[in-house]
Image (cartoon, rainbow, N blue to C red):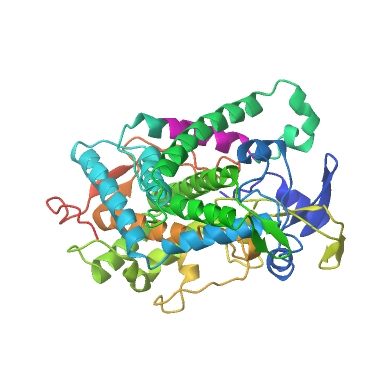
């Protein structure tokens, strides 16, 4: 079944063309559905289109745009992003520390699947995947992690889902801000969830500040505190032509960003990956044969194996294509009068990149509605390729996803570790997982349960860490 997100976009494209404009309340909005104009917005004119719109829900989430994802383009934002990028690079690709953290969580996830398999229990993988990814982010941000059943983790699950369900969905209150004077169940839920989140983050932030040392950098929050104190000691930092600094709100909202984006998006991609692997057991078998041949059963997969596992990497790319985690990238705003192709664009115009349309463009992709990892492999299947320029799973340019490298590491290590040991299938009597997602700031798959069966030779072989 060919699913279109958001519903109705195909009809609008047929009627008005690949790039068209519409009015949402008092705001002029341009919808971009083709890669040529998308790359003009994101890359060629990235700075011109680097602005972000102010909306009621995103302002509620980010203390009026003091984060990176929704924060408007400014000298403070550029300095803020530079600091966070530098801190993330400490744990980036090639870092032994973050690889060990992810491998440890993959080992824990395999142990849970093994226990369930032993008693024939079908699992909803969502909370287990969320906890594993959350622990990676917790280690990165706070040098801590959660055990199964931890009440604080359950609280985090609840407020995260509430935020995903209510923020940045172009609800009426975002289009007509004056509607917030009336009772609004979604806005009230968002405010409650943000309040719970902020209490948790504030407590961790205060604990971190209490035992902070200039001589030890344990995690991302230490790096942010160091940058903040450095600018305070110098009064301000010169960035461009303006003086900038980082407030406590900037630091807290950065951590909130990393949790919100880093956990929800990666977990969602993993859930889509498992759903598609259950639908396509032959793909699963081919990945397992590749793992058996290139890694074996004496050790766990490592990041250094990525070059030897092209079919697994191609499968991850295909999941990111067919079910982009953010079907509509966060809107951009034109910071000056400009153009897109032959179209004139006024300052303040909002621009939405329809990533779903880019990834399902039948002029760029053969049978785009079909799940086919082979489209990302070269002719003999030995190497990876990008078959179309219409592929931007993490965005591009100035506003590209900061966590791209970390997300790719997690997707590879979690999926390779699980598929090395288990075959995933639908439980007897259950339907295959629905592939029609729930539209929001991320595209979430419906809930489903999974049988994880230990593969031959693993019944007595314990899950080894990297």
61 relative to 242 in the view: left or right: left
Instruction: Please say whether residue 412 is visible from this viewpoint.
Output: yes
Secondary structure mainly formed by the magenta segment: helix
The outermost residue toward the left is 460
Please tell me which residue lies in front, 98 or 461.
98
Give the extent of the magenta segment.
155-167
Where is residue 230? Give x, y as percent: 54, 57
Residue drawn at x 48%, y 42% as measured from the top left: 434
Above or below residue 137? Residue 154 is above
233 relative to 45 in the view: left or right: left
Residue drawn at x 64%, y 53% as measured from the top left: 329
Above or below residue 255? Residue 449 is above
Q: Is residue 388 magenta?
A: no
Where is residue 174? Give x, y as percent: 74, 37
Please tell me which residue lies in front, 280 or 318.
318
Residue drawn at x 48%, y 57% as measured from the top left: 319
Please tell me which residue lies in front, 45 or 387.
45
Where is residue 266? Give x, y as percent: 46, 51
Please tell me which residue lies in front, 293 or 235.
235
227 relative to 113 in the view: left or right: right
Above or below residue 400? Residue 66 is above
Where is residue 192? Give x, y as percent: 57, 26
Q: Quadrant of the C terminus?
A: bottom left
């Amino acid at each position: 079944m060919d699913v279109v997100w958001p519903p109705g976009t195909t009809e609008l494209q047929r009627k008005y063309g690949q790039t068209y404009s519409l009015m949402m309340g008092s705001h002029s909005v341009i919808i971009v559905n083709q890669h040529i104009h998308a790359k003009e917005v994101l890359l060629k004119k990235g700075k011109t289109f680097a602005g972000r719109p102010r909306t009621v829900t995103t302002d509620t989430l980010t203390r009026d745009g003091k984060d990176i994802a929704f924060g408007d383009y400014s000298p403070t934002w550029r300095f803020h992003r530079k600091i966070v990028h530098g801190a993330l690079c400490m744990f980036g690709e090639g870092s032994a520390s973050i690889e060990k953290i992810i491998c440890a969580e993959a080992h824990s996830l395999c142990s849970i699947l093994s226990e369930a398999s032993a008693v024939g229990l079908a699992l909803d993988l969502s909370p287990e995947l969320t906890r594993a990814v959350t622990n990676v982010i917790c280690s990165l941000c706070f040098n801590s992690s959660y055990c199964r059943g931890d009440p604080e983790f359950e609280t985090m699950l609840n407020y995260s889902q509430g935020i995903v369900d209510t923020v940045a969905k172009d609800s009426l209150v975002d289009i007509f801000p004056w509607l917030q004077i009336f009772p609004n169940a979604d806005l009230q839920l968002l405010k409650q969830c943000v309040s719970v989140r902020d209490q948790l983050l504030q407590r961790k932030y205060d604990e971190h500040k209490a035992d902070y040392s200039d001589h030890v950098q344990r995690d991302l929050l230490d790096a942010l505190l160091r940058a903040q104190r450095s600018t305070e000691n110098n009064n301000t930092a010169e960035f461009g032509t303006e003086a900038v600094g980082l407030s406590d709100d900037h630091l807290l909202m950065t951590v909130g960003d990393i949790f919100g984006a880093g956990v929800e998006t990666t977990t969602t991609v993993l859930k889509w990956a498992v759903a598609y692997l259950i639908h396509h057991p032959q793909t699963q078998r081919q990945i397992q044969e590749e793992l058996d041949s290139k890694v074996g059963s004496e050790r766990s997969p490592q990041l250094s194996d990525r070059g030897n596992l092209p079919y697994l990497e191609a499968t991850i790319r295909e999941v990111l294509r067919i079910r982009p985690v953010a079907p509509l990238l966060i809107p951009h705003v034109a910071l000056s009068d400009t153009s897109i192709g032959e179209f004139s664009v006024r300052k303040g115009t909002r621009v939405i990149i329809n990533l779903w349309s880019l990834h399902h463009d039948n002029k760029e992709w053969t049978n785009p509605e079909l799940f086919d990892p082979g489209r990302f492999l070269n002719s003999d299947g030995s190497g990876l390729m990008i078959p179309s320029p219409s592929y931007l799973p993490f965005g591009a340019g100035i506003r590209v996803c900061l966590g791209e490298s970390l997300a790719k590491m997690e997707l590879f290590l979690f999926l390779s570790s699980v598929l090395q040991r288990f075959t995933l299938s639908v439980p007897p009597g259950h339907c295959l997982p629905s592939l029609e997602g729930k539209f929001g700031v991320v595209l979430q798959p419906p809930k489903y349960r999974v049988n994880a069966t230990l593969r031959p030779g693993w019944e007595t072989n314990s899950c080894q860490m990297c």
